[in-house]
Amino acid sequence: MTLSSQSANIYRQVSAPCTQLGDLRKIAKVIKKDHALGMELWHTGEYMSRQMALLIMDPKLLNQAVIDTLDKDMQQHTDAEQLQLADWLMANQLTKHKQTIALLQSWRDSPSVLQRRLFWYYQGRLRWTGQVPPGDTEKLLTLIEARIEKEQPAVQWAMNFTAAQIGIFQQEYRQRCIELGERTGLYKDRKVAKNCTPDYLPEWIAMQVAKLKL
């Protein structure tokens, strides 16, 4: 595709082999919001350009149809890149406007694996940041208990993340989340680097409760 001079300049910068995500943020800080530029970079199909695009799009212009197109485009990438792009979309766009937050909250039963992942990841992040929505934890935890073992790996991890945050920050559900991990055995045998948090719920919850003195 033919790029505008501005897009071509940004494309050259972000396509350099040594470019890191931190470099993208520095460029985005100068640009601020430029949705048209972001979409032009997105349509290059290149991974780093798409990362850059997700920093400068305007969340007010992201409706369900646009997000569905972004979702479909992400599936052209490797599994790891798909997850990074989806998580980057949530962190830098979807959580920034009430319209896109409402969309996030609606994806619990979405046919899209990535959108279901973002629903659960968002629920976990709410609890991680001290924003526990009143009255919905019981329902969410019941759904996790019923569905987590049958879910796709990308969604399964996000559900596990949410269960961990519930267990860490909501003491009344802590034992139930620990027992969920014991029952499913998910991530029990996954090796983690020294000083890193394990994904196995009983160990994850115990480590963070002790660390945070909850």
Image (tube, rainbow, N blue to C red):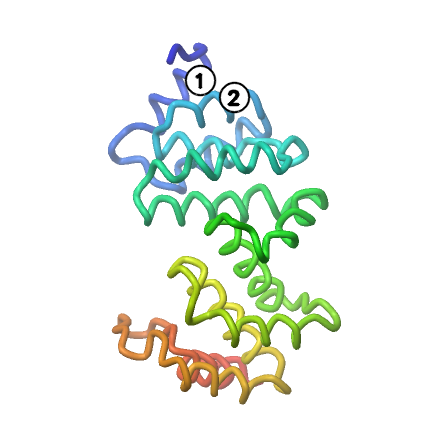
Look at mark 2 in the image and give the residue it sits on. 37
Image quadrant assignment for residue 214: bottom right
Of residues 75 and 207, the one nearer the viewer is: 75
Give the left or right position of residue 30, taking residue 149 as reference.
right
How far across and down, in percent of the image, does residue 199 sit?
38, 73
Q: Residues within 10 Å of mark 2 (few under 14, many from 20)?
A: some
Of residues 59 and 64, the one nearer the viewer is: 64
Quadrant in which the N terminus is drawn:
top left
Q: Earlier in the sequence, mark 1 or mark 2?
A: 1
Give the left or right position of residue 106, taking residue 113 as reference.
right
Look at mark 1 in the image and give the residue it sits on. 7
Q: Is residue 115 above or below residue 93?
A: below
Of residues 174 and 169, the one nearer the viewer is: 174
Element marked by disc 2: helix
Element marked by disc 1: helix
Q: Give yes or no for contact between labels 1 and 2 (Cβ–Cβ under 8 Å).
A: yes
Q: Residues within 10 Å of mark 1 (few under 14, many from 20)?
A: some
For badge 2, the amino acid type reads Leu
Image quadrant assignment for residue 36: top right
Q: How many marks?
A: 2
